[in-house]
Image (cartoon, grey):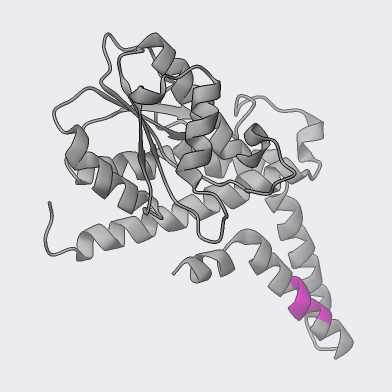
Amino acid sequence: MDVLKTLLLPLPILMLLLAISLWFCWREKPGARWLTSMSILLLWLASISPVSDRLAAPLELKHPAYRQAAAVDNIMVLGCRHQSYPHLPLSSQLELCSLARLQAAVAIWHQHPSSRLWLSGEISGQQSAHTDIMRQVAVSLGVKPEQISTLAQVYNTQQEAAALAPLIVDQRNVLVTSAMHMPRAYAWFGYYGAQVQAAPTHFQIRYPLAQFTASRLLPNPSALQTLHYAWYEHLAIAQQRLAIWWDAENP
């Protein structure tokens, strides 16, 4: 299913359209100019902020920014990605999504130093466990080691929620993950019976949607990346809804 979702992302689809249009041109097929023009137009639309931000907004703006709670028992940081290459310093081994999530969680922990910081997630093919890298960075940022718990051997959001939810039921919990990822993660925790307060971070939308400048119509890699994230999450949410509908044993 992950391979299928990858193939259904904007860039592979656009590359396929461009390849087909190029083949049409070589073969002098009817419609070659139309298909080429359409492919270039779609590539331009995919790489400008007004389009990518509109697609991302229903996800990123669904949960408001975190406001300090009166008391917190657990702060959960969902895993993202890292690269455990020896030439990289510790903080650089975490990719931006992981580092943003961890920094936001640590800031909340400093407001509630008696709370427990939960680090979860596993990445196949890495020399070091994702939770080990996260733990080391958290300690370097001032979190007490005895206040950290790790949950490895969970490889996706559903597995993280299914494993964490029974451990935090009837407690005061804060969930930290990327804003784009929050709606899906929040839904999984609710599905497994845990109430959480959302603390979204790592926002992709950097300007008010209503703000318009001509420069935003110029293609840029950030917009294409935002579209990639948003498209992936919309596909994953559709998969989530299908999985919940199909599950005969609703917890």
* Left/right of residue 211 with respect to residue 214 in the rendered view: left
Residues 156 and 14: in front is 156
Please give left or right for residue 235 compared with residue 74 in the image: right
Q: Where's residue 92, x and y in %?
A: 67, 36
Q: Which SS type dominates the magenta stretch? A: helix
In the rendered image, the quadrant that contains the N terminus is bottom left
Q: Residue at x 57, y 56 (%)?
A: 126
Q: Quadrant of residue 235?
A: bottom left
Nearest the eye: 226 or 1: 1
Q: Residue at 22% x, 40% y: name it.
A: 165
Q: Is residue 101 visible?
A: no
Q: Residue at x 45, y 42 (%)?
A: 131
111 lies above or below 31: above
Whole-percent x, y for residue 134 in the image: 50, 36
Compared across the picture, whether 66 is left or right of 187 comes to right
Q: What is the span of residues highlighted in magenta in the rendered image?
A: 18-22
Q: Residue at x 35, y 12 (%)?
A: 112
